[in-house]
Each structure stands twice: as C-alpha cells, then as structure tokens.
Image (tube, rainbow, N blue to C red):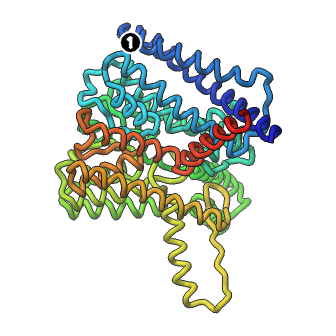
C-alpha cells in the first residue's frame, strides 16, 4: 500500500500542476482586463481585476510548484476528469471576485453570474446591463467565449497527445483528424473563423457598434446569450441583426466534426468541378461522389432541422409571428438564450414547446448544452430497432452505426449505457429541481421552463430568475448550470474520487 500511496500523491502532483498552468493562463487574462479598464476609462475597475489577477497568479504558481521535479506521465481519463473539475471549479470561484469586490453583486449573485458565464448559460443577476461598465460587459462575454470552446481544447494544444483524456473528460468525442493536438487546433481555427466572420458581418450589414458586435458574436457563437442590451436582440429591431445572430447561434450549435465535414464537402466539390472541366469525371460520377459525402450521412443536422421546423409550426399555431417564432426556436434548441420577444407573456403551450427543445439542445461536440441531438437520435434509433426485432427471425442481430463528423462509428453497448445513464441522471436532477421551484410557490409550466433553461445552459427566462429570488433557488440554478455544462458523471466521479483519495491518504499516513 505504500507504493499505492506514493503513486496517488504523484498523480495528484501532476493533476494540480497541470491545472495550475491553466489558472496561470487565467491570471494573464485577468491582468489584461485590469489594463483594459484604463482603456475604457473605467479605472475604478482596475483594482477588482488586479486583485483577482494576484489571487489567480499566486494560486496557479503554488499549484504549478506541486510538480517541481517535472514528473509527467500520460494523463489518463481519471486524471483528466480531476483536472477539468479543478480548473472549472477554481475558475468559476475566482471569477466571482471582480463582481463582489466592485460591489456590483453579493457572493451568491456573483457565483450565479460567474457560473452562468463560464457554462455559457446566459441567465443574469443584472436587471439593467446597459448601465454596466464595458469592462464588466466584455468580461461576461469573454467567460462565455472561453467556456464555449472549453478549457480542454486549450490544454490539449499545450499538453499534446498526453492531454488526450482531457478532451473526453469535457464531454467531447469528435476527433477530426487522427492526432488530438491537430484536431483541437483545427477546432480553434473553425471557432476563430466564425468569430471574425460574425464581427465583420454585424459591423458591415447592421448599425451595431463595434463593441456590441464583438460581445454578441462571442455570446452567439459560444451559445451563451449574454447581451449588452436589456431587451437582448429585440433592442435592435433589425432583421439583418437577427439573421446574422441566428446564423452564428446555429454555427455554434453544430458539432465541430460536422463543421469539418462541411469544409471537406466544399473542398471536394471544388475538386470535382475542376475534374469535370478537365473531363476526368462525368455528371453521374459527381452525383455518386456527392452521395458518399459524410455531411449528408450525419443524422444530427437532419434531426435538428426537423425539430426546428416542427417547433416553428407549433408556435405559428400559437399565434407567434414567423419571424419571432423562428428566432426563438433556434435560440432555444441551440441553447443560446437570445430573445426577440417576451416569453413570460406566452401561454403554457408555447412555454412547453420551448421547454421541450431546450431539454434536447444542440449537437454533440458543439458549444451548446442540453441532452444533445445525438443522444436523442440514438434513443429513437434503438426504439425503431426494437420494433423491427419483433418482425425479424429469431437470432437476427442489428448493428448500430452512425456518422459523426467525417467518420463512421459503431455504437457499442458502453455507448448505449452512457446515453441511457446520462438521460436518466438529467431527468432525475431536472424533476428534483422543478419540485424545489414548486415548493417555492412557482407555477408548474414556468418552473419546468426555467429549470430546463438552467440545466441545459440556455439562458431564456420567463421571469423567475432575478437577483431578489430566494437564495435556495439561486444556488439550485447555480448547481444546475454547473452540472449541465460538465456532464453529470464527470462531476459525480470527481467528487467521489476526491473524497475517496483524501480518505485513503489520511488512513495510510496515520
């Protein structure tokens, strides 16, 4: 057992040291925001961000020093889960300091706002964001932008193949190319491309100022939903703004593997055109090649479009105009949370339709939350298979295969178990949350909506989220956002392992 204890301590030194590197990176970002306060002529916010920078820098340095001997091994999935858990928890906690130190929020509200930012939820404790300083507004958007990409991407780029487990620990499965490090670099390139494209589009095709364009692009692409306006996108009352933001929300909710499949489709289409002009292939061969393109074999985009169309039709029957219905349905299913109408004035039918879509959420390996369309599609596929089994000869087996991104994957029993367990855990937490809302005297339909928005990290509200809401509701939402972003079993495993390891260390050292 002494060898076990020695190995355990070594692994925790590596875990803390690796997490410390990210915290040091966060401290650099906080320092940049303390300087930015002078650029925005908001020097009163220099101290709150500088103090947070000092805390982060010292903490990161201490964590980094746990592995002074530079002992480093391959990070397995268990190590990665602990690192992700520590990094997210520490980052959320540290990010409460600027809100509390500046006197804008109390501790409970600050934890809520920070968690909402990093988890890309978008629910807020600020009733009037238009009076907030630019430094705070940009910090809120930056939390969502980094939270949407995920700390794992940054860490894999720096750790290389040794950090492969981090990728899976944060709930990602797509590996765009064989090398994890190259995959994450490609994902970041896609993310940055849409960021630049979104900012430029909003500046050129709308009257939105540069500052607002940057904030809304980051919030839309990360499917976060923080806005610089009290009325969100409705404040601009512009069809051009809504079209661009809708496109960015949709782009953010598409899995990065699907983005890569789209990229390859255009690349291959260009080659096909050249080959056709040079008479190396004919039209029939082009059609055959198009049919074999991975993008047309991915089920998630198809199911997402179907759900959006059904949602819009339902809202049209509920006397919601086409323009507002389209924007709100996409905002809900992408789990972004931008708004162009007051949902709190809707009847129960419209609220339940939105609740259903928020629970489903966007695609796997995207910035969106919810159960994910992949899991919903897989459950539907299993149900269909079971029905087919009734009419098939005894002993006949069905194999589940699915295209994810550019590759075809077999769905094994472990994947099915994970999907069923995740869905079950989601609804257990969801039902308990709704019951707590009901205990506080809130209506059933609005309670279902608000906690679905919380647990799926959406950010839409029917008015139940407010700075003066009961503390138990605010902490319920804070925990819900945290659970929804990091995948339930990651947090559950990390907490259980942490307690077990501490217990073992105490036991064997005494």
* Front residue of this view, candidates 87 and 134: 87
* Front residue of this view, candidates 506 and 162: 506
Identify residue for label 1.
45
Q: Position of residue 203 (x, y in %)?
A: 38, 28
Q: Position of residue 187 (x, y in %)?
A: 61, 40
Q: Residue at x 42, y 58 (%)?
A: 428
* Front residue of this view, candidates 319 and 455: 455
Q: Quadrant of residue 62?
A: top right
| Secondary element at image label 1 | helix
Residue 437 seen in the current view:
yes
Could you tell whether 203 is left or right of 418 in the image? left
Q: Residue at x 46, y 16 (%)?
A: 33
* Front residue of this view, candidates 111 and 179: 111
Residue 283 seen in the current view:
no
How many marks can you see?
1
Query: Residue 460, relative to residue 46: is it above or below?
Result: below
Q: Quadrant of the C terminus?
A: top right
Q: Quadrant of residue 153?
A: top right
Q: Quadrant of the N terminus?
A: top right
Could you tell whether 177 is left or right of 365 in the image? right
Q: Position of residue 338 (x, y in %)?
A: 33, 41
Which residue occupies the extreme front position in the image? Answer: 510
Q: Residues within 10 Å of mark 1 (few under 14, many from 20)?
A: many
Q: Residue at x 21, y 45 (%)?
A: 342
Q: Residue at x 41, y 64 (%)?
A: 306
Which residue occupies the extreme right position in the image? Answer: 3
Could you tell whether 33 is left or right of 312 in the image? right
Q: Position of residue 159 (x, y in %)?
A: 72, 33
């Amino acid at each position: 057992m002494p060898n076990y204890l020695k190995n355990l301590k070594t692994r925790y030194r590596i875990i803390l040291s690796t997490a410390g590197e990210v915290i040091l990176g966060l401290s650099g970002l906080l320092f940049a925001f303390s300087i930015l306060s002078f650029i925005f002529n908001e020097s009163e916010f220099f101290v709150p961000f500088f103090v947070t920078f000092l805390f982060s820098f010292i903490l990161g340095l201490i964590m980094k020093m746990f592995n002074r001997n530079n002992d480093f091994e391959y990070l397995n999935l268990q190590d990665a889960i602990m690192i992700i858990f520590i990094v997210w928890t520490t980052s959320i906690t540290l990010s409460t300091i600027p809100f509390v130190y500046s006197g804008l929020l109390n501790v409970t509200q600050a934890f809520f706002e920070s968690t909402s930012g990093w988890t890309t939820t978008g629910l807020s404790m600020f009733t009037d964001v238009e009076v907030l300083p630019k430094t705070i507004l940009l910090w809120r958007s930056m939390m969502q932008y980094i939270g949407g990409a995920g700390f794992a991407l940054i860490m894999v780029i720096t750790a290389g193949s040794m950090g492969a487990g981090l990728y899976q620990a944060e709930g990602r499965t797509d590996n765009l190319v064989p090398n994890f490090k190259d995959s994450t670099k490609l994902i970041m390139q896609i993310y940055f491309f849409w960021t630049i494209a979104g900012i430029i589009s909003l500046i050129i095709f709308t009257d939105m100022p540069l500052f607002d364009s940057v904030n809304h692009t980051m919030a839309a692409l990360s499917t976060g939903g923080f806005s610089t306006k009290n009325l969100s996108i409705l404040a601009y009352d512009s069809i051009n703004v809504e079209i661009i933001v809708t496109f960015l929300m949709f782009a953010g909710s598409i899995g990065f593997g699907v983005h890569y499949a789209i990229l390859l489709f255009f690349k291959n289409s260009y080659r096909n055109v050249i080959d056709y002009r040079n008479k190396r292939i004919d039209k029939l061969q082009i059609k055959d090649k198009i049919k074999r393109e991975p993008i047309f074999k991915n089920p998630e985009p198809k199911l997402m479009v179907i759900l959006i169309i059904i949602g819009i039709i339902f809202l049209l029957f509920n006397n919601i105009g086409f323009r507002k219905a389209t924007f709100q349905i996409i905002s809900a299913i992408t789990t972004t949370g931008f708004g162009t109408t007051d949902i709190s004035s809707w009847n129960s039918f419209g609220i339940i339709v939105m609740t259903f879509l928020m629970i489903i959420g966007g695609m796997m390996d995207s910035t969106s939350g919810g159960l994910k369309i992949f899991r919903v599609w897989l459950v539907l596929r299993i149900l269909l298979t079971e029905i087919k089994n009734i009419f098939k000869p005894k002993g006949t087996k069905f194999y589940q295969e699915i295209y994810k991104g550019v590759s075809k994957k077999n769905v094994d029993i472990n994947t099915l178990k994970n999907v069923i367990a995740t869905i079950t855990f989601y609804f257990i937490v969801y039902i308990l949350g709704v019951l707590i809302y009901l205990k506080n005297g809130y209506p059933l339909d609005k309670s279902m909506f608000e906690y679905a928005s919380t647990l799926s990290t959406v950010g839409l509200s029917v008015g139940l989220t407010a700075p003066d809401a009961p503390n138990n509701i605010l902490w319920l939402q804070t925990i819900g956002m945290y659970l929804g972003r990091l995948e339930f079993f990651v947090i559950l495993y990390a907490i259980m392992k942490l307690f077990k390891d501490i217990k073992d260390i105490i036991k064997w050292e005494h």
